[in-house]
Image (cartoon, grey):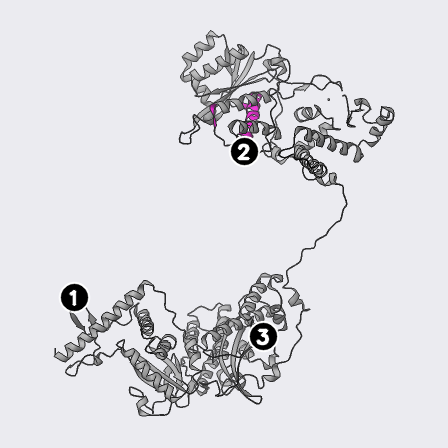
């Protein structure tokens, strides 16, 4: 290797090292490169007023290596720099790798950023006018053109690259074409399109198949050859897409030959494509010295397709205007049938999106943007607030209004709408020299006519949201009528009325009461509610009037037998009689009380859900122990409720402990006794019976289940497995233990009902709360008191006798009552301590 070659290799290595360092730094803040699309570069290509250049880039190692002595110049060379100061020369270039497109684009962008200060014009071209290795750019005159060409060459040489295959629309000077192209070769391809630099016009050439039999695969293959990024052949391509959609509707297979009539139609279309090569489209669409540039957009739709097309108008004076086709876009209509007004609106949205894309790609100042459609219904929708319209139309109107809020929409007749050619599709021979398509309507000035929007059409009105009819009824009522309807919770009404009275008193006397209503305030509120219901609602108007006048009610009054009277506060009271009715009658006497209570209970959803209707069986004769009179707990039934869980300590890390409830019930009077059992063992059961007998007395007979399997058989297994200890206990205490008939749970209906009643209260109050042993026992004993306070029958039929017979009468001779405690049912749980929360849970039993 010669000395000159080593020097050039060293320079090349330094250049590569610098580029690698810069690329590594750039990789730390890498963002995917925004490569311009082909359509955007093609649009920019149409606006270089005078000159255009086209060049391709390649890496010329011959600039660095003197290979004049090489004998194998046909094979490409690639030089790889090795960090260990070694040079390897390979005989192949790794084209086609996945990273190759990114590396090419990213390298150009980095080069443009690095050399932005030295080459500002060329850097801008590198960032905006390159697509892969193709450069499409231009200048306004020959001097700018030559300066740009020189600057591009220099900046790329700094990256070890050069431009070749130059082509320009300038005058044919030999120094403009130093590489492959000469002035005799006037047609080149650029981004898939042909450009005649001599005439400065775009040419189109489409290769067609010579076969006479076609399949759906052949049709798709031919459509894919119609490469037209700007939509200059839009009507032709639109017809091809409409034809292909017909094949889908006919459900033709990919390899199936087309029917003869359809094949003949496609053959005619293929034959017409030969006329495409006769179409020449001027590259320059702007005239020099234009006073105003106007962008016109047209949209149209049919049952087959909807589309948009854009023209650019150069206004020199009132009589000298030039308009040229810029681009177009079309889409076939959905297979599912859609109303034409909706398709027209979709075409308007397509035009709005295409207009925004074109304006972003152009490097021109557009003085005015005019958008046209031949649908007055679509224009009316665009002029309507989107929130008033249904979803389909509303979404599209919102997008159109956002994209075109600075532009003006107008109406155009279908005759003057060039987008109509796109929506119908035409053959190529009718597109040759078609001035209506390539230059738009004859006179744009005549299009500026205002058309009244059609806002009474049924298609326009059908897309409005249906308005719900609202019927308002004005009703005057007193304060009490409004408040009494707020809730059917009597305690809540008392609290509301109390606070209303407190507010009135504060307004009158400047009182400073605060907090929950006091006892006196609640009593006054209760009296006021009663007075309102009795007198002002005219429920007992006649009775109250008679008592005020003569001290007695009339003989035909329905309260005559109840000895009514008025107390000192003017409240009508009676002197004259189940659990809900009894508690109410302790203080009030509602008329038809039993019917009202039954109606309230039946309408309560909470009470109804845990008490579904089940099939009932005819009850047999009661056993002897159910009807004969003995001392309390002489003959008892015993059963166990399912395991519950309690806390041994209040700390969370201690696991809960399993516990059982033993339910003992006296057969004759339904007196209940509840005991806690820690384990299912003989010792635990004997201990429970001893506690029971120590407080209630020794029983003579015990009756229990006689199941045969699973969880219900645990008690029987307990007696069988540890029989000696348990049988000795029964023998010493002279107790007889018997079982009901196997698989006959209805024989034990009495204790099963007690278990159900216990679970009814316990599960609705405790739910999933894990209690301590002491808390669990407290609730258990209070539920026992509730079970023993259930009414059995009235003590007498006398009106004045308010007492009822309960199981508690057989224990202590009177009803079992609880200690009076403050009402906590309405308080938030977070405000209560453990025992207050326990009190609230017990008070909640009465809600059920």
Which of pointers 1 and 2 lies earlier in the amino acid sequence?
1
- Residue 325 vertical position relative to residue 481 in the rendered view, above or below: below
Question: Is-magenta flag for residue 291?
Answer: no
- In percent of width and height, residue 448 lies at 62, 81
Which of pointers 2 and 3 lies earlier in the amino acid sequence?
3
Query: How would you rate the neighbour count of disc 1 (Cα within 10 Å): few for under 14, some for 14-19, many for 20 or more?
Result: few
Is residue 222 visible in the rendered image? The answer is no
Query: How would you rate the neighbour count of disc 3 (Cα within 10 Å): few for under 14, some for 14-19, many for 20 or more?
Result: few
Q: Residue at x 23, y 70 (%)?
A: 17
Q: Is 181 on the left-hand or right-hand side of 819?
A: left
- In percent of width and height, residue 133 lies at 33, 77
The magenta segment is 745-773
What secondary structure is marked by label 1?
loop
Determine whether label 3 and label 1 are within 8 Å by CB.
no
Quadrant into which the C terminus falls: top right
The residue pinned by badge 1 equals 84
Q: Tell me which secondary structure the magenta stretch mostly adopts.
A: helix
* Numbered disc total: 3
The residue pinned by badge 2 equals 831
Question: Is-magenta flag for residue 771?
Answer: yes
Task: State the CA–CA distance, disc 2 to disc 3.
Answer: 65 Å
Determine whether label 2 and label 3 are within 8 Å by CB.
no
What secondary structure is marked by label 3?
strand
Q: Quadrant of residue 573?
A: top right
772 or 435, nearer to the observer: 772
Q: Is 829 on the left-hand or right-hand side of 3?
A: right
Q: Quadrant of residue 161?
A: bottom left
The dot on residue 408 is: 3
């Amino acid at each position: 290797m010669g000395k000159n070659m080593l020097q050039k290799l060293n320079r090349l290595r330094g250049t590569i090292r610098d580029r690698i360092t810069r690329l590594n730094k750039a990789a730390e803040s890498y963002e995917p490169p925004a490569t311009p699309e082909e359509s955007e570069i093609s649009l920019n290509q149409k606006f270089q007023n005078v000159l255009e250049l086209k060049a391709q880039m390649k890496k010329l190692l011959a600039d660095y290596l003197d290979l004049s002595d090489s004998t194998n110049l046909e094979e490409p060379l690639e030089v790889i720099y090795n960090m260990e100061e070694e040079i390897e020369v390979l005989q192949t270039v790794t084209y086609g790798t996945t990273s190759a497109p990114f590396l090419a684009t990213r390298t150009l962008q980095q080069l443009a950023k690095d050399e932005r200060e030295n080459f500002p014009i060329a850097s801008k071209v590198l960032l905006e006018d390159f697509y892969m290795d193709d450069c499409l750019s231009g200048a306004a005159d020959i001097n700018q053109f030559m300066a740009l060409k020189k600057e591009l060459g220099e900046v790329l040489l700094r990256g070890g690259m050069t431009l070749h295959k130059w082509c320009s629309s300038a005058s044919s000077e030999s120094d403009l074409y130093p590489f492959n192209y000469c002035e005799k070769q006037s047609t080149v391809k650029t981004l898939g399109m042909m450009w005649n630099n001599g005439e400065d016009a775009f040419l189109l050439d489409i290769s067609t198949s010579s076969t006479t039999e076609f399949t759906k695969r052949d049709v798709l293959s031919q459509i894919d050859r119609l490469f037209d990024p700007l939509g200059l052949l839009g009507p032709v391509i639109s017809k091809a897409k409409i034809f292909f959609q017909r094949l889908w509707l006919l459900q033709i297979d990919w390899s199936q030959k087309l029917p003869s009539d359809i094949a003949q139609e496609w053959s005619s279309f293929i034959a017409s494509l030969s006329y495409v090569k006769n179409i020449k489209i001027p590259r320059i669409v702007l005239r020099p010295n234009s006073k105003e540039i106007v962008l016109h957009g047209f949209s149209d739709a049919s049952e087959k397709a909807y589309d948009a097309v854009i023209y650019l108008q150069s206004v020199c004076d009132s009589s000298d205007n030039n308009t040229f086709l810029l681009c177009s876009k079309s889409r076939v209509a959905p297979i599912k049938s859609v109303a034409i007004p909706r398709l027209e609106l979709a075409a308007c949205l397509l035009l709005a999106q295409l207009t925004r894309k074109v304006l972003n790609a152009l490097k021109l100042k557009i003085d005015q943007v005019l958008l046209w459609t031949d649908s007055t219904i679509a224009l009316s929708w665009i002029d309507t607030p989107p929130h008033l319209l249904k979803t389909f139309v509303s979404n599209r109107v919102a997008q159109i209004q956002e994209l075109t809020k600075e532009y003006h929409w107008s109406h155009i007749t279908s005759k003057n709408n060039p987008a109509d050619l796109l929506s119908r599709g035409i053959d190529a021979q009718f597109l040759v020299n078609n001035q209506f398509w390539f230059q738009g309507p004859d006179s744009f000035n005549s299009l500026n006519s205002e058309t009244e929007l059609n806002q009474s059409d049924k298609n326009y009105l059908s897309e409005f949201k249906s308005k719900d009819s609202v019927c308002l009824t004005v009703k005057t009522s007193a304060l009490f009528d409004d408040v009494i309807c707020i809730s059917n919770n009597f305690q809540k009404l008392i609290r509301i009325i109390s606070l209303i009275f407190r507010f009135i008193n504060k307004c009158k006397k400047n009182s400073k009461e605060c907090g929950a209503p006091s006892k006196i305030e609640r009593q006054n509120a209760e009296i006021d509610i009663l007075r309102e219901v009795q007198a002002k609602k005219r429920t007992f108007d006649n009775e109250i009037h008679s008592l005020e006048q003569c001290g007695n009610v009339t003989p035909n009054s329905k309260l005559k037998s109840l000895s009514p009277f008025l107390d000192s506060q003017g409240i009508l009271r009676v002197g004259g009689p189940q659990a809900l009715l009894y508690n109410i009658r302790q203080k009030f006497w509602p008329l038809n009380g039993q019917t009202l209570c039954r109606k309230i209970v039946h309408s309560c959803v909470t009470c109804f859900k845990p008490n579904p209707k089940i099939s009932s069986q005819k009850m047999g004769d009661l056993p002897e122990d159910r009807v004969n009179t003995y001392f309390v707990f002489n003959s008892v039934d015993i059963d166990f409720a399912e395991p519950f869980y309690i806390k041994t300590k209040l700390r969370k890390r201690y696991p809960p402990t399993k516990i059982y409830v033993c339910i003992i019930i006296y057969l004759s009077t339904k007196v209940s006794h509840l005991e806690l059992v820690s384990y299912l063992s003989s010792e635990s059961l004997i201990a429970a019976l001893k506690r029971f007998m120590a407080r209630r007395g020794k029983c003579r007979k015990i009756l229990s289940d006689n199941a045969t399997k699973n969880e219900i058989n645990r008690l029987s297994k307990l007696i069988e497995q540890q029989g000696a200890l348990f049988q000795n206990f029964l023998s010493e205490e002279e107790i007889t233990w018997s079982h009901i008939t196997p698989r006959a749970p209805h024989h034990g209906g009495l204790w099963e009902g007690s278990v159900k009643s216990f679970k009814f209260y316990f599960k609705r109050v405790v739910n999933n709360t894990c209690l301590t042993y002491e808390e669990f026992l407290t609730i258990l004993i209070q539920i026992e008191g509730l079970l023993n306070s259930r009414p059995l029958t009235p003590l007498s039929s006398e009106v004045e006798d308010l007492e009822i017979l309960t199981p508690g009468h057989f224990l202590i001779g009177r009803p079992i009552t609880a200690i009076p405690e403050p009402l906590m049912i309405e308080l938030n749980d977070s405000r209560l301590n453990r025992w207050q929360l326990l009190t609230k849970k017990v008070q909640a039993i009465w809600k059920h």
